[in-house]
Image: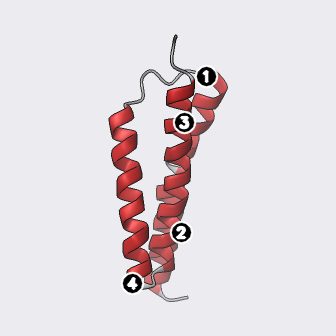
Amino acid sequence: MDAFQIVGFIALIASSVGFFPQVVKTFKTKKAEDLSFYTLLLLIIAATSWIVYGFSRSDLFIIWTNSIIFVLVFMLAIMKLSYRKS
């Protein structure tokens, strides 16, 4: 593993883990009113775009990082819609 792969791995972990505490907190509290749906939507679009770009470059770090981010942000968006007050 070269230095750039190590940096890529660190980026993968840091970027992906950054969303995990919010997913856990939102799931536990069943409250998502403070989350901006538009921000979540933009993050989903960004992650999807990065995944497509990663495939075009055959870059596994970009693909894996943004796939994990996509899943976590998508979960937040689903919780945002599910936990709305009626």
Q: Looking at this view, name the residue that lies furthest to the top.
A: 86
In the displayed structure, would residue 64 be above or below residue 43?
below
Res 68 visible: yes
Q: CA distance from mark 1 to mark 2?
A: 28 Å
Marks 1 and 3, how far apart at CA? 11 Å
Residue positioned 56% across, 22% down in the render: 83
Which residue appears farthest toward the right when viewing the image? 28
Type of the residue with mark 1 = Lys
Determine the CA span between mark 2 and mark 3: 21 Å
- Secondary structure at numbered mark 1: loop
Question: Residue at horizontal 36%, vertical 64%?
Answer: 49
Q: Which residue is mark 4?
A: 57
Of tags 2 and 3, the one toward the viewer is 3
Q: CA distance from mark 2 to mark 4?
A: 13 Å
Quarter of the rendering containing residue 26: top right
Which comes before the other along the chain, label 2 or label 4? 4
- Please report whichever mark, 1 or 4, sits nearer to the chain's N-terminal start: 1
The disc at residue 40 is none
For residue 30, which numbered disc appears in the image?
1
Q: Nearer the viewer, residue 68 or 41?
A: 41
Q: Helix, strand, or loop for circle 2? A: helix
